[in-house]
Image: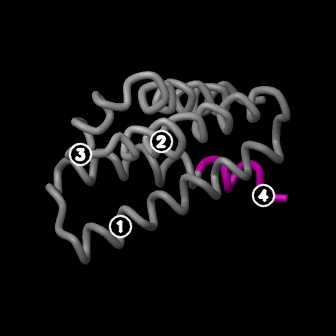
């Protein structure tokens, strides 16, 4: 497995770890505001945390097919981000930085692991 694949999987685990273990920090980084419910923290732990930790770990365990799936996940995230840039007009610099962590890994993983 190429080193870049392993680094992408590890980065996915690290970013997921923030969502899983530090959802308040993650919420602040993503400009999300708490309400009178802790359901948002639960969603961050699940969707921005555990999901990405599991994807990254599975890539390290299973290899090529899992890396392709991770590429699909990053492609979807980047597509959602690009659509948000066009429709929602988030802070552009921040959105582009996040997009830079989504589309390049997607392109690499899909290109190198295409079935």
Q: Which residues are magenta?
A: 108-115
Q: Nearer the viewer, mark 3 or mark 4?
A: 3
Left or right of 112 in this view: 97: left
Distance between the alpha carbons at the discs numbered 1 and 2: 18 Å
* In the image, farthest residue toward the front: 36
The answer to the question of whether label 4 and label 2 lie on touching residues, with beta carbons closer than 8 A, is no
Pointer 1 or 2: first along the chain? 2
Q: Mark on residue 36? A: 3
Main secondary structure of the magenta stretch: helix
Q: Nearer the viewer, mark 4 or mark 2?
A: 2
The tally of labels here is 4
Q: Nearer the viewer, mark 1 or mark 2?
A: 2
* Place of residue 93 in the rendered image (x, y in percent of width and height, measured from the top left): 17, 50
Q: Residue at x 63, y 52 (%)?
A: 71
Pointer 4 or 2: first along the chain? 2
Which quarter shows the C terminus?
bottom right
Distance between the alpha carbons at the discs numbered 3 and 1: 30 Å
* Quadrant position of residue 67: top right
Q: Residue at x 82, y 27 (%)?
A: 61
Q: Residues within 10 Å of mark 3 (few under 14, many from 20)?
A: few
Q: Is residue 81 magenta?
A: no
Pointer 4 or 1: first along the chain? 1
Identify the residue position indicated by label 2 in the image: 48
Q: Residue at x 60, y 41 (%)?
A: 51
Distance between the alpha carbons at the discs numbered 3 and 4: 45 Å
Distance between the alpha carbons at the discs numbered 2 and 3: 20 Å
Q: Nearer the viewer, mark 3 or mark 1?
A: 3
Against 14, is 31 above or below?
below
Identify the residue position indicated by label 1 in the image: 82
Distance between the alpha carbons at the discs numbered 4 and 1: 23 Å
Which quarter shows the N terminus?
top right
Pointer 2 or 3: first along the chain? 3
């Amino acid at each position: 497995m190429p080193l870049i694949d392993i680094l992408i999987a590890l980065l996915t685990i690290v970013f997921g770890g923030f969502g899983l273990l530090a959802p308040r920090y993650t919420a602040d980084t993503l400009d999300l505001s708490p309400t009178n419910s802790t359901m948002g923290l639960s969603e961050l732990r699940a969707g921005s945390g555990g999901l990405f930790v599991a994807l990254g770990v599975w890539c390290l365990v299973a290899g090529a097919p899992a890396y392709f799936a991770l590429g699909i996940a990053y492609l979807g995230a980047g597509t959602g981000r690009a659509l948000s840039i066009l429709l929602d007009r988030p802070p552009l610099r921040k959105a582009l930085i996040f997009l830079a962590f989504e589309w390049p890994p997607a392109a690499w993983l899909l290109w190198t692991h295409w079935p």
